Structure formats: C-alpha cells, structure tokens
Image (cartoon, helix red, strand yellow):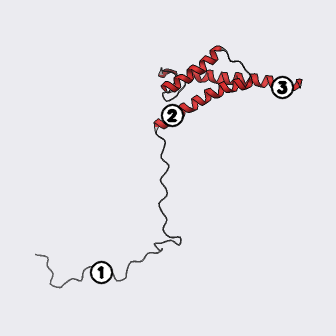
Amino acid sequence: MAFKSKTPSKGLRQKTPLQTKKPLQSKAGFKAKPAAPAALPSPLDQKKTLQRQTIRALERAKKAALEAGVDLSDWESDFIDGVTERVKTYGRAFADPDKGAMNGTLSLLQGQKLREIRKKVKDKANRETPESSDEA
C-alpha cells in the first residue's frame, strides 16, 4: 500500500446535476416503434402465384376466342389445353432450363405463341366488329 494518502479524499463529485438542453420527452409523448415491414412472400408462394397467373392467362385467351367467335386451329386449342395441364401438373410447361427462366412457367417460345394467339383473337374480333355495325 505504497500509494495511500494521508488525507481522506472526497472522491469525484459533481457540483451541479446534469441537465439536458432538450427535454427527454416530446410534447406528443413517446412514440411506439414503427411496425415491422410486411413479410416478403416465400419463394413457394411466389411460384404458386406465377402458376395461377399463367393458368388464368391461358384460360383468358381461350375464353376471349370463344366470346369473339374466333375459331382457333386444332393445334392452338391443343397447345392451350396441353400447356394448362402441364402447368397444373408440374408447375411449369417446359423441362429444359435453356428454353426459359428457371422460375418461369412458360418457355420463351410458349409465351410468344400465347401472345400470338391473343393477338390473332383481338385482330379478328376488331375486324368483325366494324362490319357487323355497318350492316345494321
């Protein structure tokens, strides 16, 4: 105990209490934490959603053709039915990853053919509509 002093020390004491410049509590009071962001959908949910969207798009194309009175070729009808069944059964309509996106339900060419069918229906429906209104 070589460092023992002869006078008792008072210790460190502060002359005035600590004060803040701003009050700790705002006028509105304490606010709760902001709500946590909504949970992102899981990859499985995203996959199921994409499958439903694809099936709905295929069904809309077929329904639009029926409503417009456009006769789809046998190949086009079989294409829509076959792709719909494959998406329902396997979750996608193609097996080769080089033909489309890994998380996609249609290959690039299948998507292109679907757009062509919808365009064909739309064009034929638009051509038939003005003729029928001229006759009336």
Is 39 or 14 nearer to us in this picture?
Answer: 39
Determine the residue positioned at 14% across, 84% down: 6
Distance from Cα at disc 3 to Cα at disc 2: 41 Å
Query: Who comes first in sequence, dot 1 or dot 2?
Result: 1
Query: In x, y percent, where is residue 80?
Result: 60, 21
Quarter of the rendering occupied by the N terminus: bottom left
| Element under disc 2 | helix
The amino acid on which the numbered mark 3 sits, given as a three-letter code, is Pro
Distance from Cα at disc 1 to Cα at disc 3: 96 Å
Q: Are marks 1 and 2 in contact (CB under 8 Å)?
A: no
Is 16 or 77 nearer to us in this picture?
Answer: 77
| Element under disc 3 | helix
Is 48 or 12 nearer to us in this picture?
Answer: 48
Residue bearing mark 3: 130
Vertically, is 60 above or below 36? Answer: above
- Relative horizontal placement of residue 136, taking residue 35 as reference (left or right): right
Residue bearing mark 1: 13
Is 59 or 114 nearer to us in this picture?
Answer: 59
- Total label count? 3
Query: Who comes first in sequence, dot 1 or dot 3?
Result: 1
Query: In x, y percent, where is residue 111?
Result: 59, 24
* Quarter of image, res 76: top right
